[in-house]
Image: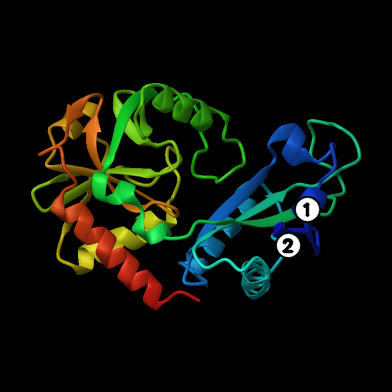
Amino acid sequence: MSRLVYVNGNFVPEAEAVVSVFDRGFLMADGVYEVTSVLGGKLIDFAGHCVRLARSLAELDMTNPHSDAEWLALFRQTVELNAVVDGMVYLQVTRGNPGDRDFAYPNPAVPPTVVIFTQSKPGLAQSPAAKAGWKVISVPDIRWGRRDIKTVQLLYPSMAKMVAKAAHVDDAWMVEDGMVTEGTSNNAYIVKGNRIITRHLSQDILHGITRAAVLRFAREAQMEVEERPFTIAEAQGADEAFITSASAFVTPVIEIDETPVGTGNPGPLALRLREIYLDEMQKTAI
């Protein structure tokens, strides 16, 4: 069955889901996006994604076209129409179609382009990668300086992902000024003893919604959290490493630049955090 995609107020078959060639999202990467997990037909941490969406739009001087309640209704309708049990909902909001190409923002502003679509991923929470663990390599971080805004500008993360694929590993951790920033589409962590170490929030990294929840659960479980940068060498010498994201939840990292982390197997703390996260978030899914 063809997916139904929401485009500017209407649900249409995916083959008919189109936007203008003059849309600034296409011409300028002038837009933001969010991705929300679906487990058991319910949305995971939806409120957190709404908060980040509002922040990203505000940072780009774009008006949020819907209230949180309206977004929720649209997301639920998209999930129901596509019969998604486990999977993802993607939202993209661009500055819209001003009718021609120009570097300057359209003045007066034009209606934003809004697209919502789903990806069905049966058994999302039972990913084999979570049991096996990821292998990663390091690459230079040469992205623009506002990584805290979740824009549709994803070319370099895509390039880094392809470098990782060519190296027959799962992902790449990006490094700037000798310090790990984050993965291609995830936040990065290491573990020393009972202490979780992850880079502090700034314009250098995405303010991960899964990150916020995982760190909250870690503190509630009496785990120590230290927010600071770390090097690849420190990560290679850690007891454990892991990543978090909306689609991978908490996934252990077992190798960095061909060096095993800890025992070279998924660590107990990362696996426990994944268990806690999935349990707690499914309790509050909507």
Where does the image place residue 205, in percent across and percent down from the top left?
Answer: 42, 41
Rendered position, 135 above or below 15: above
The kind of residue tagged 1 is Pro
Which quarter of the figure has residue 79? bottom right
Q: Secondary structure at mark 2?
A: loop
Which label sits on residue 120?
Answer: none
Quarter of the N terminus within the rendering: bottom right
Would residue 55 be found to the left or right of residue 215 on screen? right
Name the residue at the right extreme: 99
In the picture shown, does residue 154 fall above or below 35?
above
Q: Are marks 2 and 1 in contact (CB under 8 Å)?
A: yes
Disc 2 residue type (three-letter): Pro
Taking the spot 82% from the left edge, 51% from the top edge, the residue there is 16
Residue 251, placed above or below residue 141: below
Instruction: Tell me where residue 187 appears, x and y as whole percent.
Output: 37, 44
Of the pair 218 and 16, the residue shown nearer to us: 16
Residue at image location 29% in from the left, 29% down from the top: 179
Q: Secondary structure at mark 1?
A: loop
CA gap between label 2 and label 1 equals 7 Å
Residue positioned 65% across, 68% down in the render: 71
Mark identifier at residue 112? 1
| Numbered marks: total | 2
Colouring used for the render? rainbow
